[in-house]
């Protein structure tokens, strides 16, 4: 057997035994893979928990690595290769907060090595990736939390209760989206060559090799198809996840998408205007993005029912309805407001993950939920990029009668990286 296989076998046995006997007051040893802005925000939340012991940090960018080590204390081990971190038996769980194209490989390998995983959203870069991630989690009986923190927000749960109670009547349309003016923020960003201290080859990983990006890569990777899916997977993953939860659905039956990069002449690839329409058996959902916008910015999600509408955000929700009588009398207006201060959803989400490591109960944003939401996001982008109406077979996880669209379900990794049959190398 290869050394990694021997380590994996021993580690799996150790982790399974640990998961069975871990008491409520015992400490959980955590490592982090990917210590950028979002990674360090999560790292801070984990470090605040009384039962967490930090043991290791991995990043391919030296300044990020040093910042995360400083947050946890000099005793933590530092790595530039996630595989070396996973080979250490010290970590019970790992945070994966890398760019999107690096979510699948560490997550699959961590599961195979017997570690539980908190992996940022969107779960994957492709549909096949998240399917293999889900398979690995189930095969190795791992707790895997997707970083869709709204699932742990108390007022989101209350809003879902209102929607599912029938108080809004029949809901046949849901609208969601992001509107902002990104042009001032994107202007004058300069070139996208690798900054000093970044291992560029490791950062690219399974993605095709290129010398540089038109925009600095450490944040703006989000606007390039080989590393992310634009606002569809950045913010869309949050709202579409809540729609699936509230409407109790798994997958659309068809998807159409429109848009491209119109106003942002910065070398990015993902749309600055995008409209995606999802057809479900009982309702229609649309996702709308406007990066070029002079009006008030906003992040919106609205459920439109025959008896009322519900508008939901991270700060609360509002229910309102207008009654239109059949007579000629003036219309009557009935409004009911239910608002809640924005709960600390991210910290609650971290706490839920840690509690589930001990109980072995599936977490609020279990990897299967993350996979189903990622499928919706990726289908929206595939429909937009191909200009086709896609009919989706959720059982087979492929488009119906469209071999061209099915080629977008994954891409060939750059050698030597490989992801298949639940094994990452």
Image: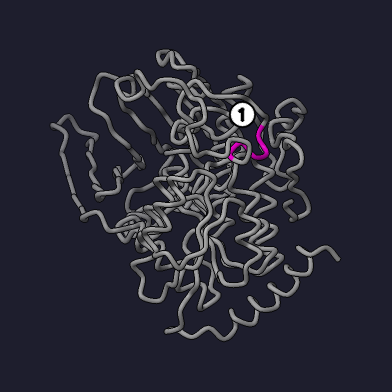
Tell me if residue 275 comes above or below residue 302 in the rendering. Answer: above
Q: Residues within 10 Å of mark 1 (few under 14, many from 20)?
A: many
Q: Can you see residue 126?
A: yes
The magenta region covers 203-207
Q: State the colouring used for the structure image.
A: one colour
Q: Specify whether residue 376 is painted magenta.
A: no
Give how far across and how far down residue 295 sits, in percent.
24, 22
Q: Residue furthest right?
A: 1
List x then y, in percent, for residue 170.
40, 45
Lateral position of residue 166 relative to residue 252, left or right: left
Nearer-the-camera pick, 179 or 140:
140
Query: Can you tell which quarter of the image residue 208 is in?
Result: top right
Give the residue at x 61% y 19%.
Answer: 387
Q: Which residue is mark 1?
A: 382
Q: Nearer the viewer, residue 388 or 237?
A: 237
Quarter of the image for residue 45 reads bottom left
Q: Quadrant of residue 93?
A: bottom right
Residue under the point 46% across and 51% down? 65
Quarter of the image with the N terminus is bottom right
């Amino acid at each position: 057997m290869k050394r990694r296989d021997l380590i994996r076998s021993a580690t799996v046995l150790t982790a399974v035994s640990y998961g069975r006997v871990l008491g409520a007051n015992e400490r959980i040893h955590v490592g982090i893979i990917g210590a950028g802005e979002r990674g360090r925000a999560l790292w801070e939340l984990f470090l605040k928990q009384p039962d967490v012991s930090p043991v290791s940090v991995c990043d391919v960018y030296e300044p990020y690595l040093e910042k995360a080590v400083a947050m946890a204390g000099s005793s933590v081990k530092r790595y530039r290769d996630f595989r070396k971190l996973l080979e250490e038996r010290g970590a019970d769980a790992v945070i994966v907060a890398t760019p999107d194209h690096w979510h699948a490989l560490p997550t699959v390998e961590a599961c195979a090595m017997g570690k539980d995983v908190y992996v940022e959203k969107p779960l994957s870069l492709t549909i096949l990736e998240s399917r293999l991630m889900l398979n690995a989690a189930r095969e190795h009986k791992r707790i895997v939390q997707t970083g869709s923190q709204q699932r742990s927000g108390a007022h989101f749960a209350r809003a879902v209760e209102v929607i599912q109670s029938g108080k809004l009547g029949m809901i046949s349309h849901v609208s969601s989206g992001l509107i902002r003016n990104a042009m001032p923020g994107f202007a004058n960003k300069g070139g996208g060559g690798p900054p000093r201290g970044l291992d560029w080859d490791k950062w690219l990983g399974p993605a095709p090799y290129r010398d540089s990006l038109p925009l600095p890569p450490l944040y703006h990777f989000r606007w390039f198809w080989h590393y992310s899916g634009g606002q569809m997977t950045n913010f869309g993953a949050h709202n579409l996840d809540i729609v699936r939860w509230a409407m109790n659905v798994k997958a659309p039956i068809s998807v159409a998408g429109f848009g491209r990069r119109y106003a942002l002449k910065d070398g990015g690839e993902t749309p600055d205007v995008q409209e995606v329409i999802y057809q479900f058996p009982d309702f229609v959902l649309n996702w709308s993005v406007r990066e070029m916008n002079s009006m008030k910015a906003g992040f919106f999600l609205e459920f439109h029912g025959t008896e009322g509408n519900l508008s939901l955000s991270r700060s609360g929700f509002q229910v309102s309805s207008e009654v239109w009588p059949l007579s000629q009398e003036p219309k009557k207006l009935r409004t009911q407001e239910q608002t809640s201060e924005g709960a600390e959803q991210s910290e609650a989400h971290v706490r839920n993950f840690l509690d589930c490591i001990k109980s072995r109960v599936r977490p609020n944003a279990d990897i299967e939920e993350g996979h189903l939401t990622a499928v919706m996001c990726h289908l929206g982008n595939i429909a937009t990029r191909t200009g086709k109406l896609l009919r989706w077979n959720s059982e087979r996880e492929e488009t119906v009668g469209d071999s061209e669209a099915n080629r977008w379900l994954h891409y060939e990794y750059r050698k030597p990286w490989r992801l298949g049959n639940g094994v990452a190398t």
